[in-house]
Image (tube, rainbow, N blue to C red):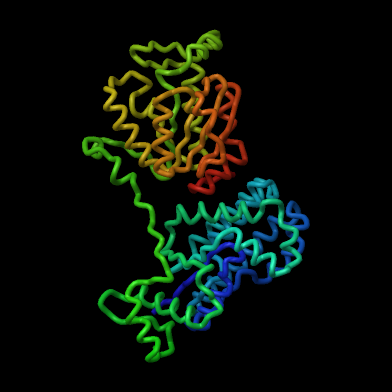
Amino acid sequence: MSSFHLAVAGIMGSGKTTLARSLANELHLTYVPEFLNGKKYLPFLFENPKKWAFETQLSFFTEKSLQIINKLKSGQSIIVDRTLLEDYLIFAQFFFDNGYIEKKAFMTYVQLAKHFLNEIQKPDLIIYCRCSLNIVKERISNRGREYQKNYPKNYLTDIFNRYNSWIEDFKESALYLIDSEASDFRNQKVITTIKNEIQNILRPKGGFVQLELFSSNINKTNKNIVNEVNEPFLLEKLIHKTNQTNHKYLSSKIKKKLKIPPYPYAYIAAPFTSVSSNLHRKRVQKKLIEMEQSHGIIPDGLYKEMLKSLTKKLKKIGLNSLLPHRDINEWGKKILTPNDVVNNCSDQVSMCDIFIGLIGSSLGSHYEFGLAFGLKKPSVIIKCDELNNSFICSGITNRLPNVQVFSYNKIEEILDIVNEKQFLGFLMKHVPISVN
């Protein structure tokens, strides 16, 4: 058979290294460690992360990538201690988001990471070690490693939260969770059980395990365990989120007619008929909006040009857009019933890859954000003083899961968002974009 790629994931202190090493011995796999030569950077990284973060993360990722490539090409089956995706989407992203890696350097890292991820065979199976933050902190404290004493404030909490978000949206490979507090990976019986559960997971239905990597014959004791474990009980399968864009919220009449932008695309919600009259009075000299409420027409002007320019700027970084004002009702020129609007907008929100909302005081935009939030879509909320934010809108903060908030004074300043490091970082965390 071809080379087999197994990986163990999890935050430091979760038990992943102990599990990976034990399974390497039990399953006769080549062990690829968490840190290779890059380990020498760790004492310096947390003393001066601004100086060493980029070089450290680059070293970790490239060395591990080359190790994986070389071993798989040579026909070896491997078990990797920490996936490449964790290095990229959790740790490198942390150092970038916190200003320890400059934007240009991070873009270089991203290009290299995407190249290796495209070249390397994805893991056939990932085991994620789930552990509470308190236990993680306790285990790390007991290790007594000097460099871990220099972790930035709230570092472990931040990394822990990033892992939770990563797992929540994970769709790359088959992934199983294991409670590393309840399971002692130093116990041989536990490791044997996990090994047999892996065999059962990979066993073709109705057949025997056909994996040459398990080179030793299963002894009688192990046979009994395999027969008892028809379904895993230590390993819990991560149920991937169904792509609700294809199912639940798609109305039958719209399925045939709905035009869906290429992946990835953002749904851009913004005030339409509810644009504040105060905004019009303040900016009438610039003819921002002169809207006939009965018809809902958005004429040419600053507001319309800002929305159009925003879609163009997003396009330049690789993010397509669905702008309902333009794409669904043609700036108000297309006659639609309330039911048409609700069906069309609901369908598109449920299908988008990321939600961008200038919700202001618009009831429609509030509905669209509520739908996106309920569907756990990554969401960017843009607050603007000229859009008269509602009471509820003022309560939306970065503390909400998968939500990033930005604030501006004037309409035209909203376009500056495409240059914001936090905005680009949020996009790169959730959808593929290409920033030069």
Q: Residue at x 55, y 44 (%)?
A: 426
Q: How many marks?
A: 0
Residue 111 makes an appearance in the image = no
Quarter holding the C terminus is top right
Q: Position of residue 47 (x, y in %)?
A: 78, 57
Q: Residue at x 36, y 74 (%)?
A: 202
Q: Position of residue 112 (x, y in %)?
A: 58, 57
Picture quadrant of residue 58: bottom right
Q: Residue at x 63, y 47 (%)?
A: 97
Residue 12 makes an appearance in the image = yes
Picture quadrant of residue 176: bottom left
Q: Position of residue 149 (x, y in %)?
A: 74, 61
Q: Is residue 150 left or right of residue 70?
A: right
Q: Nearer the viewer, residue 255 or 311?
A: 255
Q: Position of residue 398 (x, y in %)?
A: 56, 39
Against 372, residue 172 (above or below) is below
Quarter holding the N terminus is bottom left
Against 264, residue 39 (above or below) is below
Q: Nearer the viewer, residue 389 or 41?
A: 389
Q: Residue at x 47, y 43 (%)?
A: 378
Picture quadrant of residue 224: bottom left
Q: Nearer the viewer, residue 179 or 30?
A: 179
Against 345, residue 401 (above or below) is below
Q: Is residue 120 left or right of residue 13?
A: left
